[in-house]
Every structure is written in C-alpha cells, then in structure tokens.
Amino acid sequence: MAQALRQGGDVVCAVRGLTKTYPAVRGRRGAPGTPAVRATDDVRLDIRRGEIFGLLGPNGAGKSTLVRQLTGLMRPDAGRVEILGHDIVRHPERAARILAYLGQESSALDELTVSLAAETTGRLRGLEARQARAERDAVLEELGLTAIAGRPLKKLSGGQRRLACLAAALVGERPLLVLDEPTTGMDPVARRAVWAAVDRRRAERGTTVLLVTHNVIEAETVLDRVAVLDQGRVIACDTPAGLKEQVAGEVRVELVWREAAPLHVPEVAVLRERAVESGRRWTLRLAPEEARTVVATVTGGSAFAALDDFTLATPSLEDVYLALGGAARQGLVKA
Amino acid sequence: MRMGQDDCRSEKEQPDVSVVSADVLPGSALPAGEEAAGAAELGPRARMWPSLVAVYRAQLSRARFARIPLLFVATFQSIGIMILMRGVVDGGGEAESVVAGASVLVVAFVALNLLAQYFGQLRASGGLDHYATLPVPPAAVVLGAAGAYASFTVPGTVVTAVFGCVLFGLPLAHLWILAAVIPLAGAALSGLGAALGLLAPRPELATLLGQLGMSAALLLGVLPADRMPEAVRFARDLLPSTYGVEALARTFGDHPDWAIVLGDLAVCGAVGVVSLAVATWAYRRAAVR
C-alpha cells in the first residue's frame, strides 16, 4: 500500500481505513449510558501538496476526532496515516515535527501575553531564541496583532484570541498546517488576515493546509478540495464546484411569509409537505422547472399578499450535504 | 542536578511522547522498507534545557495576571495560622514547629494544591494538546511548570518565616536554610501536585486531591508532633512536606544538628526526583489518548 500511497507523488497526507470507536459508557443512577460511537469510520483521504483541503460536516460528524488522529494526539483503532512519508500511527511523536496544529482550545496560552505565547510556542517548536523572537515579530505584524502584543489572551475578545493562537501556530515553519475552525468568532478583517497569511505560506513555501470547518461560505470560498463528513464517514470528496455539480439539477427556493403561510391556497398547501419549515421561513429544494412554477404561484394571486420575501438560489455545499444523505438537517452554518 | 542529566540525555535518547528507536533521528538511516524512500526531513526537536527555560518563563509570567491566588493567599493563610497558634503553643520547640510548618505550608498550598488544579484543568480542557503537538520533551513541560510554581512560593515562604520568627521570638540567623528548603520541598510537593493533577480522571478530583494534600500538610505540619497519636505520627512521616518542616525547625536551635537537617533535605530531594518522574510519565500518558 505504501507504494500506492506514493504514486501520487504530491500526496502530503494519506489516510487509509482510519477507524476509531469510542467505547460505550454504562449508565449510572440518574444518568443514562451512551452506546459505543464510531467517531471515524474507515476514512480514506489524500491531501496533496500546496492545497487547502477542508473537512466539512456538522457538529459531531467526527472532524475533530479525525484531526486528532492525524496530529498524533489520538491513536486510531485501525488504519494508517502517512504524512510526508512518515507513519503517524506507529510514530505519533513525529507529527509534532512535521505539522503545526491549531486546536479549538487556548487554555495553555490563556494567561500569557500574545507576544510571549507566540515566542514560547516558537521556542518549543525548536527555534533558537533570536529566531523565535524574529518570527514572533513578523507573524504578529502580519496578522495585525502588534498593537495588542502585550495583552494577555484571556483579556482579548474571542476572535482576537483565536488570531493570537493562530499566530502561535505559525511561528516556526511547518510544511503542513492543521487548523481546527481557525476563524471562529472573527470579524471580516481578521478572517481576511488569516486567509492572506495562509495564502502567502502556500505561495512562498508550498505549505499544505488541512482545515476543519462547519462554515459553508468559508468552505466554498477558500477550499481547493473538501471532504464531507457525516457520522464519521467521508460521504463525498471533491472540489466545492465538483460537489455542487452533483446537485446541479436542484434549485433552492426560500419563501418568507408575513405571518402564516396561506394554506387556503391549494398550491401552497401541497408545497408544505416538501418544505423545511423554520418559523415564517420555508426552504424547498426543487427541479428548476418546478421552482419556476412555485415562484409564479406565490408571486401572483392571493398567495402574494401573504408573502414577505423570497429567494431563488443555486445549490450551496449545504445542499450537497443534505442531498448526499447527511443526517443533520440544520447542521451547517451559513455565515 | 537532575535537570542536567535530562539535558544530556535528550541529546542521545528520544524523550518524546512515545518510544522511538534512534534510527529515526535526522541523518541516520531510516528503517528498511516502506519509509526508507521519500520520507521528508523532520523539523528540529526542541532541546531539553531551552524548552524547560521557555516553559518556566511562560509559567512565571502568569503571576503578573494571577498575582493574588499565586502569591498572596497562601501567605495570608499561614500568617493567620501562626497568629492563632500563638495562644496555643508556649514557645520553645513547639513554636519552632509552628513557624516551620506554616512556612512550608505556603509551599504546599501553591506547589501542590494550585499546581494540581492547574494541570487538572489543563488536561480536562484539552490544553495539553498545545504541548503535545510541539516537539518538546515531556519532562521540560512538567519541570518548567513545577519550577515556576515552586518559585511562586519564595516570597510567601520567606515572609511567613520572618514574620513567624519575630512573632515567636525565634532567631533569624539560620533562615538561609530556606534557600535549600524551598527548592527541595518545592520539587517534592510540585512533583506530587503535577502527578495528582495529571492522573486525576476529572478536574474536580484533581482539585480535591490538591486540597486534601494541602490540608494534610497543614494539620500534620503545623500542629506539634508530640501531641499526636501514634497512627497520625506515622502518617506525618509519610508526607514529604514533613521533612521540609523538620529541616527548617531544627535550624532554629542554637546548635542545629546539620547532619539530620541534611538527611531531611535529602528525603525531600529524593521524593522530588521520584514524584517529578511520575509526573512526567503521567504527562505522556495524558497527552496521547
């Protein structure tokens, strides 16, 4: 298999048959037990050099568990992970010397200043003192953190703290960056700084990025390829555009009613069965022909009086996820 | 001394999260077979001493933002206890035990109790992932944090000892022994605290164990030993802080028996080495699940 893995040549991270099951927890008095959960189920992935590869899925899909196995933080029950030719399952400690990881937790850095968090992380990544300080200054400047370098992470807003943690992850060059929801809580300016920093590393050094996200818009705009995870399984893996082609035959219609839906109109009453209702909002996934008819119906006649707003949109990755049989109906974030 | 050994060792051995043979070191031949060709060069490993210093410095800086719990609470507690005990003990040997016990209690509060809480919370919140995904020797993380927590106890212990000496009219002449008592008792108690924090399955349990350890140091260290029943005295002998207390208490006399003082300090040092080794093992265990 190792031969097969290397045939791609440019494959930075190859995952085969990765399986991890969390054991069942027996219920105690007052607390019900939980059955065994297969957090990753026979996962197979190839991440190529220089690409931004995304793991997309709702909360609990197994994204973080998968990433923890790729970074050597968790041992899989079965399967292989090979990063740049190194077997991470057999030698998990090598992961720390190949990749930089931005986890979801900042508690190890919370009481440090932004500056010291970045510098210390650089030192622990094996940099000499002078080099660590120089890289710290460069990264803080790059991410626009210089002004708050002397403040402890604890006192920063969620987005700023996240950015400071990313700064720590970027001090000390690594060919692979594993970023678990890096832009959570960030404003658009900070987000742009993140993607600019990632792009620069990719352009200058051919850095590969594995990105965990549950944000559909972000996935569509920044990812080269995306694996869609559902209940621990990869249910699709392609470019965002390629995935959307799978549901190209569908159009999403969103109807917003002023108060209640005009169910006295027979056409609207029929539509109700196919709509996902969320308060005054109905979401329908329809063939283009059907969509045209629906729009004609609700924009004319007595239904129009009850209509507040409507949109007609081409499919997003969220539609792909639902079309592929994703279990969570409202799991993905659009923001 | 121990750190020096580790420093040397890290040059030759693999001190990382799991055991790997020397053939993975850069420049040496990779194992025959699948990984022999095409494996990328690994980034540098952080060396023992520089990473220990980096962790120590980072931990020490936390005192700037958590000054009250780390530096003041323990001192106030110990001074309060000495004032209370003033009405109970009648000078002499008992006063020496009270002052020594209250001083070492500062070490127990910070190095054992607070460090157990810190590692317990770090482990529960996933904060250990940060260190586990850096190529840093586990001993550097544990020793750096333990060293910083032992350092936090210095001002409080000194203030408590001086205040106690003045309060009970004891000589200040041999207080320099604190320069040995604080690091050695600090090593023993912070090693114990780190091990408890990293081994406890839940953070509340780590907090509880830290509190219990400190309470034991309080009851068994501050109260004069002569008045205790046999069983309690045996428990007192098992507690590492006792030897720090004894060493300090003996130096208040006119002609301290330095051999016994040295013996007590050696026990502290030995417990320190063992407990820090256990804590390092516990860290490795907690870092990869």
Image (cartoon, rainbow, N blue to C red):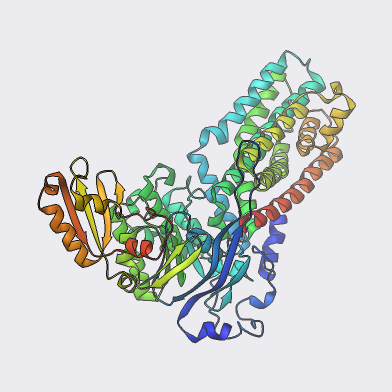
Q: Position of residue B283 (x, y in %)?
A: 65, 54
Q: Position of residue B90 (x, y in %)?
A: 79, 15
- Residue name at image x 43 percent, y 77 percent: A48
- Residue name at image x 42 percent, y 53 percent: A115
- Label total for image: 0
| The one of B267 and A297 positioned closer to us in this rendering | A297
Q: Position of residue A80 (x, y in %)?
A: 58, 73
Does residue A83 show up?
yes
Question: In the shown orientation, is residue A193 left or right of residue A76?
Answer: left
- Residue name at image x 62 percent, y 38 percent: B204
Q: Quadrant of the C terminus of chain B?
A: bottom right
Q: Quadrant of the N terminus of chain B?
A: bottom right
| The one of A56 and A259 positioned closer to us in this rendering | A259
Q: Is residue B85 above or below residue A34?
A: above
Extreme residue toward the right, this view:
B230
Does residue B107 show up?
no
Give residue A214's quadrant in the image.
bottom left
| The one of B267 and A331 positioned closer to us in this rendering | A331
Give residue A312's quadrant in the image.
bottom left
Question: In the shown orientation, is residue A146 left or right of residue B116?
Answer: left
Q: Position of residue A28 (x, y in %)?
A: 66, 40
Question: In the shown orientation, is residue A216 left or right of residue B248?
Answer: left
Q: Is residue B136 above or below residue A239?
A: above
Extreme residue toward the top, this view:
B87
